[in-house]
Image: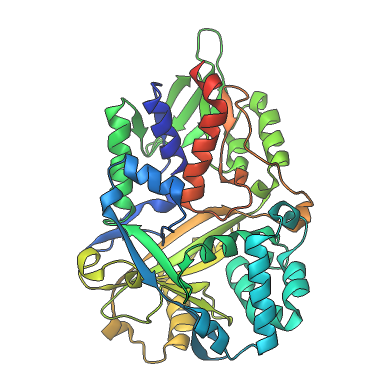
């Protein structure tokens, strides 16, 4: 989405644009998948009412009337029991914490979303900050299982700013006296969004090159353009392209692997200025097409070690009759270190571990034969750059300026934010606004 949105903006500004995508379709984490009887997103996405950057882009693409809103539910599984956490009354009835614990947890959420300075929270771990603000019991009973499920080996290193960003985003989606969650989606999913972006690019003369991984980036020699890219095709053929300006939107570590020595100082400086590029969270996501619903929740958070980060039931957000033909659509993500060897596991092994080790422990009556229509396994080693307190930095406030013919611009530069498409679109808008004069020149 970052590369496509940036290309969209540059093409509309009159530049000749080419976008290189290593895979066979555009969109990255927002790319669609054919599940047999319907097409929907490879990974789970939702839109929040305060996602104004993304909503404005949707309107610009003519998709404003396809935006749908729905009040959704949230659950929590802990101590072998499902708990509804969809509103204030549910929170007050949550039995795993005392009234005093709930007061401290509520006070922490109130303080974090209204008064906390997120830049200071880069320097302290979520563990230390939550223990100090919520108390040890609340941390160990409520937060620790969630942090382990989400961050695995990084759970005790993740900076508290991630908790701030998550709470600020999620509680911004709640409205009314009951504090119910209100979420949205685009009819047709991100397939519709990407289709409109690709059409806009084509109408402005931009080229989208699929199956074109970058093998090398170097300065141009005599008679060449300022920056030269070399791609490696599926048959091993190499192609060369020259540009006045290149934006590298993949992880910084990948830029270091393909770039010439002349570009390495810029890459090292970006890695130093934006230290979240040093550690990435990846995901292996099993997606099930089901004959019937599992839960009444859009998100079921898991407070026990079941090998799953959570259960996301997409068809409790989207219109199942219109989007999936009435089938249930459930995502079972497992977040890992980007270097975890589990990314090479077979689909069958991923399926067995997620279903036998996780889903059947949650739902003992679940039957593969009777409940599952089909399944798919998606893998993404580089999903989210992690703000780790061990880096000891508050982060750079703002985006880099345009520095030369080879420019890194990626999601490690997001400040005080969770990774979502609204933040990505906003990042492009901010960069274009700050560097418009240089780009036009």
Camera-nearest residue between 97 and 363: 97
Q: Is residue 411 above or below residue 140?
A: above
Q: Position of residue 307 (x, y in %)?
A: 54, 76
Please indicate whether residue 15 sits to the left or right of residue 198 in the image: right
Q: Nearer the viewer, residue 89 or 83?
A: 89
Count of marks placed on residues: 0
Query: Which quadrant holds residue 197?
Result: top left
At which x and y percent is residue 207?
Answer: 34, 29
Name the residue located 67 percent from the left edge and 30 percent from the top edge.
266
With respect to residue 93, does 398 lie above or below?
above
Q: Is residue 64 above or below residue 270?
A: below
Residue 437 location, x and y as percent? 54, 20
Q: Is residue 301 left or right of residue 65?
A: right
Asked if 340 appears above or below 136 in the picture, the reply is above
Horizontal side, residue 51 vs residue 407: left or right: left
Where residue 10 sits, quadrant-wise, is top left
Residue found at x 72% / y 71%: 130
Looking at the image, which residue is at 54% across and 80% down? 306
Q: Nearer the viewer, residue 165 or 157?
A: 165
Residue at 42% x, 38% y: name it: 5
Question: Which residue is at the front of the view, 102 or 381?
Answer: 102
Q: Is residue 362 left or right of residue 435?
A: left
Chosen colour scheme: rainbow
- Of all residues, the one furthest to the top in this rendering is 223
Residue 190 visible in the current orientation: yes
Q: Quadrant of the N terminus?
A: top left
Q: Is residue 338 visible?
A: no
């Amino acid at each position: 989405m970052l590369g496509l949105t940036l290309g969209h903006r540059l093409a509309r500004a009159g530049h000749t644009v080419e976008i290189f995508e290593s895979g066979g379709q555009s969109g990255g984490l927002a790319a669609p998948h054919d599940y047999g009887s319907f097409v929907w997103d490879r990974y789970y996405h939702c839109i929040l009412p305060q996602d104004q950057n993304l909503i404005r882009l949707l309107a610009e693409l003519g998709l404003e009337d396809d935006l749908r809103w729905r009040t959704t539910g949230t659950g929590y599984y802990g101590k072998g029991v499902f708990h509804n956490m969809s509103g204030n009354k549910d929170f007050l009835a949550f039995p795993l914490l005392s009234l005093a614990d709930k007061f401290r947890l509520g006070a922490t959420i109130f303080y974090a979303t209204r008064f906390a300075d997120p830049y200071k929270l880069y320097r302290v771990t979520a563990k230390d900050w939550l223990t100090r603000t919520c108390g040890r019991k609340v941390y160990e009973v409520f937060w620790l299982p969630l942090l382990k499920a989400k961050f695995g080996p990084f759970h005790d290193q993740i900076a508290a700013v991630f908790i701030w960003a998550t709470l600020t985003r999620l509680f911004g989606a709640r409205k009314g006296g009951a504090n119910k969650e209100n979420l949205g989606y685009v009819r047709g999913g991100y397939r519709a969004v990407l289709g409109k972006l690709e059409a806009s690019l084509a109408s402005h003369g931009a080229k989208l090159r699929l199956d074109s991984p970058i093998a090398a980036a170097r300065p141009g020699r005599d008679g060449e353009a300022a920056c030269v890219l070399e791609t490696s095709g599926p048959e091993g053929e190499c192609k060369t392209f020259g540009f006045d300006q290149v934006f590298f939107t993949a992880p910084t570590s990948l830029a270091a692997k393909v770039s010439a020595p002349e570009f390495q100082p810029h890459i090292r400086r970006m890695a130093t200025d934006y230290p979240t590029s040093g550690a990435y969270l990846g995901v292996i996501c099993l997606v099930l097409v089901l004959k019937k619903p599992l839960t009444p929740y859009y998100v079921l958070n898991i407070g026990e070690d079941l090998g799953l980060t959570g259960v996301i039931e997409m068809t409790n957000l989207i219109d199942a009759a219109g989007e999936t033909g009435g089938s249930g659509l459930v995502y079972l993500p497992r977040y890992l270190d980007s270097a975890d060897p589990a990314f090479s596991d077979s689909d069958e092994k991923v399926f067995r571990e997620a279903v036998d080790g996780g889903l059947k422990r949650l739902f003992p009556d679940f039957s593969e034969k009777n409940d599952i229509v089909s399944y798919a396994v998606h893998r993404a080693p580089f999903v989210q750059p992690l703000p780790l307190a061990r880096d000891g930095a508050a982060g750079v406030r703002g985006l880099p300026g345009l520095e030369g013919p080879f420019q890194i611009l990626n999601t490690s530069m997001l400040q005080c934010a969770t990774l979502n498409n609204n933040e990505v679109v906003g990042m492009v808008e901010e960069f274009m606004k700050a560097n418009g004069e240089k780009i036009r020149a």
